[in-house]
Image (tube, rainbow, N blue to C red):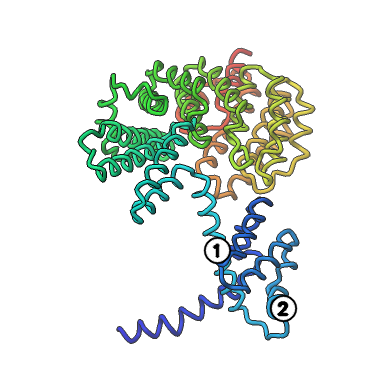
Amino acid sequence: MRQYYFCLKIVICKPVLILEKNLLPLHKNKVIIVLKSLTPDEIRQLDKFVRSPVHNQHDDVVRFFQYVRKHLSGGERALDKERVFGHLFPGEAFDMQQIHYISSYLLKVVEEFLAWKEWKNDLTFFGLELMKSYRSHRLEQSHRACLARTMNQHQSQQLRDSQHYLHLYQLREQAYLTARTQGRSKDFDLQQLIDAQDIAFIIEKLKNGCNVLSHEAVKKTKYKMGLLDPVIHFLNGHPFLELPSVAVYYHAYLALSDNSNENSFVQLKKILESHPTAFPLADLRDLYLFAINYCIKQLNSGNQGYLREVFEIYLAGMSIDIFIENGVLSPWTYSNFIISGIRLREFDQVESFINSYKQSLPEKEREGLFRYNYAFLYYEKKDYQKAMLMLSTTDYGKDLLTTCAAKTLLARMYFEQNEMETLLNLLQSFRVFIGRKELLGYHKDSYGNFINTLYKLINLRAAKDPDAREVRGDLANYKVVAAKEWLLSQLTGIESQ
């Protein structure tokens, strides 16, 4: 067995791996993908980094970077592996393995540059690492001066997230080590060190608790929460709740874990409004989404008063661009804001939003989402001609959900305008479409139930004495059905004829 395993590993596996590397086009190489993601300023900084013998001692890597930098936007042909090799090694026989070695070295330098850039921008972390070096070299005076300078820089920062308190704990720890070295440890206030450590832990624990609740709501999975319950109990009435970064996650968790806890939702909103600069942008985005999720749970429970809350939270978030991540707005955020605004009849604000944020949508889905949501706005304004024109002239590509939403909206307009022949043709093709798309998941049932119900509404509308009880029963029993409120409203209309 041992001999067979050895032969399998060497004779079969290794050549296959090398072959796969050789087949990989250079423009899909990992280092090329990373370089394309960098800004022009980062590329200029990286150029100095690559040239520095501290970080790179291979001239081939410098020449490779210079060539790639010049041709990053030149397409596949400019980065043809044989052309690159000819530039680096003129007159030599092509050897793809050489290109792989050089690109691997360059990737290592690029990754070191990216880590260095993050490290350099974190002044507190930079100071902490410098203090460690001073201590290891027994430069106590330099250590004390660095500690005082770093502490002042740290306290002047506006952010008060868990990272702030973790760094504060680490700085207090350095101060304690200094006091102990000088024989003054008995006079040192250890409470500040203990509090900073506790606060950092509590913020992270509460944040994870909020994330778990949001995840459980979608995935229907239960997690063990560990020390979270003792933390919640510990915080009840504790002075730590005077800190915005503790209080905001405390109230977010209480609101998400209990729909009836409106007071915590109100406190969450107040903190977000009064302390927007206390949190990093990514944390602030999550906190706004926690508030929106609470409102959505209320709406799903029938509390329609929270529709205005959702709309206002979206407006507040848009005003400070927290929903834009790496220059991109989530299609869900785009559509949810539009839906909430339309239901509130805030047509002017919705139309302005549709146009203003179009370019922030993911490129592949941009045109389809833009035109579908504009069509939905026209539909709600009863301008069916413009709505149909928007939908009929749009190619949604591989965006299955927007395609299904567009077909559903068209079906609603055909039904309302009594264009039955066109509607029947659409429903037939729609059913075939969803039957072929396995990637739709549970949405296949949702749209399938919509089609089935609409067929029944067509028959009810044509009946002399329509009996809607069966259709109402179906709608009550369906776990998922698209446009359920609209179907019920049409059913009510048929009953009242």
Q: Which residue is mark 1?
A: 109
User: Residue 81 location, x and y as percent?
Assistant: 68, 73
Q: Is residue 337 left or right of residue 184?
A: right
Q: Which residue is mark 2?
A: 86
User: Residue 284 location, x and y as percent?
Assistant: 50, 31
Q: Nearer the viewer, residue 407 or 346?
A: 346
Q: Quadrant of residue 388?
A: top right
Query: What SS does tag 2 mark?
Result: helix
Q: Nearer the viewer, residue 192 or 79?
A: 192
Dot 1 alpha-carbon crowd within 10 angstroms: few under 14, some 14 to 19, many 20 or more: some
Q: Is residue 236 left or right of residue 283?
A: left
Dot 2 alpha-carbon crowd within 10 angstroms: few under 14, some 14 to 19, many 20 or more: some
Q: Nearer the viewer, residue 50 or 243?
A: 50
Residue at the top extreme of this rendering: 496
Give the residue displayed 70% in from the left and 76% down from the top. 82
User: Residue 92 location, x and y as percent?
Assistant: 69, 85
Instruction: Pick the quarter of the image with the C terminus.
Output: top right
Q: In this picture, is 122 found above or below 417?
A: below
Q: In this picture, is 426 found above or below 469?
A: below
Give the residue displayed 37% in from the left and 18% down from the top. 260
Residue at the front extreme of this rendering: 141
Labelled pair 1, 2 in contact (Cβ < 8 Å): no
Give the residue displayed 56% in from the left and 38% down from the top. 448
Q: Is residue 394 left or right of residue 35?
A: right
